[in-house]
Amino acid sequence: MISPRSAEEVGEAVTTAAAEGLRVRMAGSGHSFTGAAVTDGMLLRPGALARVRSLDEHAGLVTVEAGCPLRVLNEHLQARGLALANMGDIQEQTVAGAIQTGTHGTGRDLASIAAQVASLEMVLADGTITSCSAGTDLFLAARVGLGALGVLTAVTFRVVPGFLLRAQEEPMRWSEVIARLDELTSSNEHFEFYWFPHTEGCLTKRNNRCDGPARPLPGWRYRMDDEFLSNSVFGATCRLGHRFPGMIPAVNAIAGKALGARRYVDASYRVFTSPRRVRFKEQEYAIPRENLAGVLAEIRALLARRGSASPSRSGSPRQMQTGCPPHRAGTPPISPSTCSTPRPTRSTSARLRR
Ligand SMILES: Cc1cc2nc3c(=O)[nH]c(=O)nc-3n(C[C@H](O)[C@H](O)[C@H](O)COP(=O)(O)OP(=O)(O)OC[C@H]3O[C@@H](n4cnc5c(N)ncnc54)[C@H](O)[C@@H]3O)c2cc1C
């Protein structure tokens, strides 16, 4: 196990490993739900390759080393009035780990984190350091490459002026979400919802750009909702449901009501991301947008047939997000007050947690 401090040290490690007949894998923060970062060969750790290298505010480009956590990048950009245009649910991953697996959030016109990458610096299998950018085959293949095409040593992102998001979160009945799915996904820049299996309860989230002023959640409300209810209580109810599966419908009915409606306005990355302290496993499926309602109805019917006590039970919320393919993603707006044009969405991802 090695913690390289530069692209040159990564190159030396790769050459040494090749001479010893070992495979090489660089890990990020280990947040993948699979063993994607595991190797029986030489493991490179990201901790010493985690600096912000440069920022060109005029060009809107920031270059960070591969092991830089998204949280550090977000705070660095925020301090300079800049931001990533879209994010996933958490910001603990390294930039390389996040893009290598196609990490994404929800977005009507904006795609994944990898879609915001302008160029990559990487070490190839023969130990050479190379750079690639949009339009080249290497870039297209390596951007979401699961670490298979080489070791990324630095990533350059296109960034946008910092912006505020107005968050509107509210419980909604399943039947209403399904009936309004087209409207909710097309009239909001970022729409997603969680469904609590074996109940009618959903929690909907709509995030849209706004001019401000910022109205962050009061500290007590953040601690109550995002720390206490979404982590401590959620963790306890998961354990309870796992131990006594017959209780899942009742537990989920309470969980679906515990998180009430709330509205706030805050810096984009603080709205996109939340603390997630409950350990879970997740499967994710991409479904063509037009098939979403039908697929959800089938999943719901399947779970109802099996019942909460079946061996394949899972009471964890199902998360539904809308995604925009990179080639159709809009250019991020130039100013926080400029809204992007609504466009039909192509796919939806449904996440199943266990
Ligand atoms: C609580 C939680 C919330 C999550 N939320 C979301 C979400 O909202 N949206 C979403 O899409 N995903 C989400 N994920 C999944 C997560 O974003 C991805 O699994 C991501 O890859 C984790 O990044 P990491 O830094 O931990 O990478 P790791 O898991 O350590 O590695 C992932 C892959 O990247 C490769 N890799 C890492 N660094 C390099 C490098 N320098 N060069 C080459 N290859 C490299 C590894 O070899 C491995 O194949 C979530 C996961 C958790 C645990």
Image (tube, grey):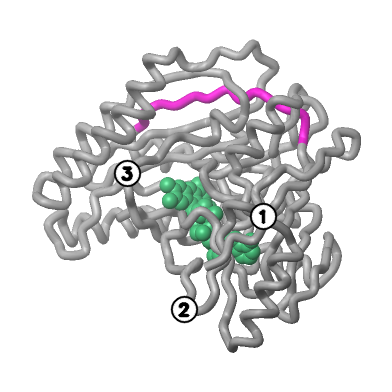
Taking the spot 57% from the left edge, 19% from the top edge, the residue there is: 265
> For residue 342, what is the image quadrant?
top right
| Among numbered discs 1 and 2, the one appearing first in the sequence | 2
Q: Would you say the beta carbon of the disc 1 residue lies within 8 angstroms of ligand 1? A: yes
* As drawn, 144 above or below 194: below
Q: Main secondary structure of the magenta part?
A: strand
- The C terminus lies in quadrant: bottom left
In the rendered structure, which amino acid carries the disc numbered 3? Val
State how far apart marks 2 and 3 are (Cα). Answer: 28 Å
Q: Residues within 10 Å of mark 2 (few under 14, many from 20)?
A: few
Taking the spot 77% from the left edge, 29% from the top edge, the residue there is: 161
State how far apart marks 1 and 2 are (Cα). Answer: 22 Å
Q: Residues within 10 Å of mark 3 (few under 14, many from 20)?
A: some
In the rendered structure, which amino acid carries the disc numbered 2? Asp
Q: Which residue is mark 1?
A: 66
**In the displayed structure image, the side of residue 212 where residue 340 appears, left or right:** right
**Is there a contact, CB below 8 Å, between mark 1 and mark 2?**
no
**In the displayed structure image, the side of residue 298 where residue 93 appears, left or right:** right
Q: Is residue 292 visible?
A: no
